[in-house]
Image (spheres, helix red, strand yellow):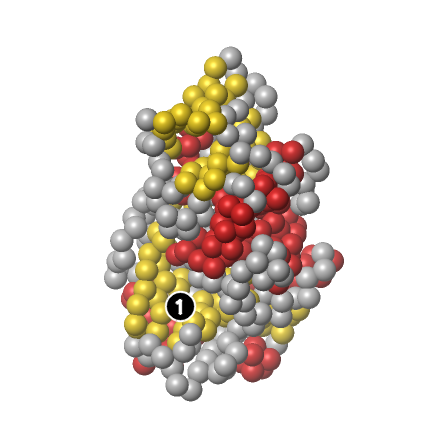
């Protein structure tokens, strides 16, 4: 067992963790150590669909999404990595009057915050995404700034830049405990040694509840399997396909190479660390495809995978720092993104940097404090997928 020290230890090597490490190191924080029990991005990040957007119903999510979109747009310069960004827009298809009314409210809020989203009629929705069947559709929302990019490349970009700036990123290193004494964090214990530190950032995604437990903090995060499939090449596929979402079923698709990436939620999925692929969700997926994009039923599937959402009770993230006296020492957290961690990763890394440095965050995330559930302070995000 080895023993060394760090000013701050980041636990978790997904996009939120590597973004945090990069932004801390860029701000001049010395001895930033990130530990990841597997490979970088091996948890939820590199199983994500890659969507990036600012179309949300909650102001804080809109701001985090919009700021992250700006960062993705200049990622080639800072931190310096090609991420295959396709700004093809997000198209939410709406089929109930209640969803249309909610979408109209959301678009007004998004527009007030500078997001160029808009309501579109059924004919325009069909023109934007010709694979869609318009049966039962009432309207849609669309924002041209949204799109998708490659999660693995985003992780690589942040990780490479963080290391260049002096951060130490350690993979295949599992956290076993966080030690404290006299009300202060003193060390992070791993299976590869002890790291002396007084500050920890939990960015462990679906595994965050265990990490919080080391310091007596309840991070109310539940793992939930979500699955994705990718079709075989489609010779007649349009060069531009918006990230299209059937809001009522959660079925979605976007272009992936010469085919389509598709997915949806499974209402029957039991919570837990189910990391294997299962065919049990395929009948539901087929029904949703048949209702909204029936021509895709004739397209073969080439591959697919399973990953984990990190769900919270209101499907909003947990971001903040535990107050003095509640837990030992400085314990910050950024987790529970409920499917939105990849797209919010750039802005969240900035926010955690600011919280650590005692600065006013670039986005006010005070409403995302983990303690909100103790006072029934749920603030549900409606634009989920």
Q: Kindly tell me whether residue 340 is visible in this rendering.
A: no
Residue 69, by quadrant, is bottom right
Look at the numbered disc 1 and give the secondary structure of its residue: strand
Locate the N terminus and report the quarter of the image it occupies.
Answer: top left
Determine the residue located farthest toward the right in the rendered image: 112
Q: Is residue 302 left or right of residue 50?
A: left
Determine the residue located farthest toward the top in the rendered image: 182
Q: How many marks?
A: 1
Query: Within 10 Å of the Cα at label 1, are there few (<14), some (14-19), or many (20+) other Cα atoms?
Result: many
Coordinates of residue 125 in the picture (x, y in percent): 56, 77
Please tell me which residue is depicted at 36% across the width and 79% down the height of the picture: 233
Q: Is residue 120 left or right of residue 231?
A: right
Please tell me which residue is depicted at 47% across the width and 62% down the height of the picture: 150
Q: Is residue 280 left or right of residue 96?
A: left
Q: Where is mark 1, residue-wise? A: 262
Please tell me which residue is depicted at 54% across the width and 67% down the height of the picture: 85
Nearer to the camera, 95 or 321: 321
Residue 106, by quadrant, is bottom right
Q: Is residue 329 above or below residue 356?
A: above
Coordinates of residue 52 in the picture (x, y in percent): 55, 61
Q: Is residue 334 above or below residue 247?
A: above
Nearer to the camera, 226 or 322: 322
Q: Is residue 136 above or below residue 310?
A: below
Coordinates of residue 256 in the picture (x, y in percent): 43, 72
Nearer to the camera, 162 or 62: 162
Q: Is residue 83 left or right of residue 310?
A: right
Please tell me which residue is depicted at 43% across the width and 21% down the height of the picture: 179
Nearer to the camera, 104 or 79: 79
């Amino acid at each position: 067992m080895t023993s060394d020290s760090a000013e701050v230890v980041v636990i978790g090597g997904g996009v939120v963790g590597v973004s945090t490490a990069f932004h801390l190191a860029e701000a001049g924080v010395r001895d930033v150590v990130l530990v990841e029990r597997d490979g970088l991005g091996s948890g939820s990040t590199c199983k994500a669909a890659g969507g990036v957007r600012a179309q949300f119903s909650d102001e804080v999510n809109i701001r985090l999404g919009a700021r992250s979109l700006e960062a993705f747009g200049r990622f080639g310069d800072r931190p310096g990595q090609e991420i295959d960004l396709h700004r093809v827009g997000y198209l939410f298809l709406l089929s109930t009057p209640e969803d249309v009314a909610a979408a109209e409210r959301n678009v007004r809020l998004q527009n007030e915050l500078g997001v160029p989203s808009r309501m579109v009629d059924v004919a325009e929705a069909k023109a934007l995404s010709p694979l869609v069947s318009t049966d039962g559709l009432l309207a849609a929302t669309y924002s041209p700034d949204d799109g998708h990019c490659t999660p693995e490349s985003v992780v690589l970009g942040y990780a490479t830049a963080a290391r260049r700036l002096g951060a130490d990123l350690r993979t295949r290193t599992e956290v076993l405990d966080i030690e404290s004494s006299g009300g202060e964090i003193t060390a992070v214990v791993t299976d590869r040694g002890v790291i002396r530190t007084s500050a920890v950032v939990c960015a462990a995604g679906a595994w965050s509840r265990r990490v919080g437990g080391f310091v007596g903090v309840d991070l109310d995060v539940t793992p939930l399997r979500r699955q994705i499939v990718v079709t075989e090449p489609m010779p007649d596929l349009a060069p531009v396909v918006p990230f299209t979402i059937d809001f009522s079923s959660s079925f979605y698709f976007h272009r992936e190479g010469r085919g389509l990436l598709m997915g949806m939620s499974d209402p029957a999925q039991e919570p837990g660390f189910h990391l294997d692929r299962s065919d049990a969700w395929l009948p539901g997926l087929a029904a949703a495809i048949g209702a909204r994009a029936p021509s895709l039923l004739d397209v073969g599937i080439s591959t697919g995978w399973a990953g984990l959402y990190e769900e919270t009770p209101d499907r909003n993230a947990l971001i903040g720092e535990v107050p003095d006296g509640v837990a030992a020492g400085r314990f910050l957290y950024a987790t529970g993104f409920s499917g939105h961690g990849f797209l919010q990763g750039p802005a969240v890394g900035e926010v955690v940097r600011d919280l650590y440095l005692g600065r006013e965050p670039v986005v006010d995330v005070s409403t995302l404090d983990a303690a909100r559930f103790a006072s029934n302070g749920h603030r549900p995000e409606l634009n989920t997928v």
